[in-house]
Image (cartoon, helix red, strand yellow):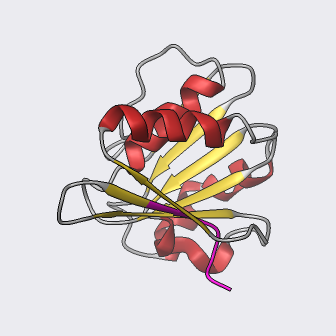
Amino acid sequence: MIPRQETVTFSEMETLQYGARIGSTLTPGTVVALSGPLGSGKTTLVKGIARSLGISTAVTSPTFTIIQEYQGIMPLYHMDLYRIDSLEEFDLLGAEEFFYDQGVTVIEWSEKISSILPSTTIHISCRIEQDQSRTITVGEAS
């Protein structure tokens, strides 16, 4: 388990840069579970992760497509489960196979499928503070 770390970012650029730092540590087969309310910085973190993987394509939230694949030094599988209503619906997509691929899988709204995430999943939660900064917590509470 990764020790719990909290970071506060004060701009979109800082959140993007923090995502890039996280991304630079990821290896093939890593699953990253993102949670937090709308607008809390989840997609911005994914953009930073993509940048660190050498992906130059514009990264957007795949809310309507659910899964977007990007090619860089290793594949990035970006999932947005906002519109998924059940674990059964996720199963119908066959998306669990991405967890065991040679790319990095990043899942927004991951709490919807928490029961099937690999035990090695990196958990990251994002929250918006009153001053509009973002608190990003990596790792689960001990």
- Image quarter (top left, top right, bottom left or bottom right) of the C terminus: bottom right
Q: Is residue 63 above or below residue 40?
A: above
Name, please, the residue furthest toward the bottom.
142
Task: Give how far across and how far down residue 7 sits, in percent.
Answer: 49, 57
Q: Is residue 51 above or below residue 12?
A: above
Q: Is residue 102 left or right of residue 81?
A: right
Q: Is residue 111 left or right of residue 39?
A: right
Q: Is residue 21 above or below residue 70?
A: below
Q: Would residue 66 be visible to someone looking at this image?
A: yes
- Residue 25, image quadrant: top right
Q: Residue at x 73, y 54 (%)?
A: 99
Q: Residue at x 75, y 50 (%)?
A: 30
Q: Is residue 82 magenta?
A: no
Please name whichever residue, 72 or 20, is drawn nearer the observer in this view of the structure. 20
Task: Give how far across and how far down residue 52 sits, in percent.
Answer: 63, 26
Q: Would residue 88 be visible to someone looking at this image?
A: no
Q: How many marks?
A: 0
Which range of residues does the magenta coloring cover? 136-142
Task: Give how far across and how far down residue 15 sits, in percent.
Answer: 41, 41
Q: Residue at x 36, y 72 (%)?
A: 85
Q: Is residue 138 magenta?
A: yes
- Residue 54, image quadrant: top right
Q: Is residue 57 left or right of residue 3?
A: left
Q: Residue at x 67, y 58 (%)?
A: 96
Please name whichever residue, 12 or 38, is drawn nearer the observer in this view of the structure. 12
Q: Is residue 65 left or right of residue 142?
A: left
Please name whichever residue, 62 or 14, is drawn nearer the observer in this view of the structure. 14
Q: Is residue 97 above or below residue 141?
A: above
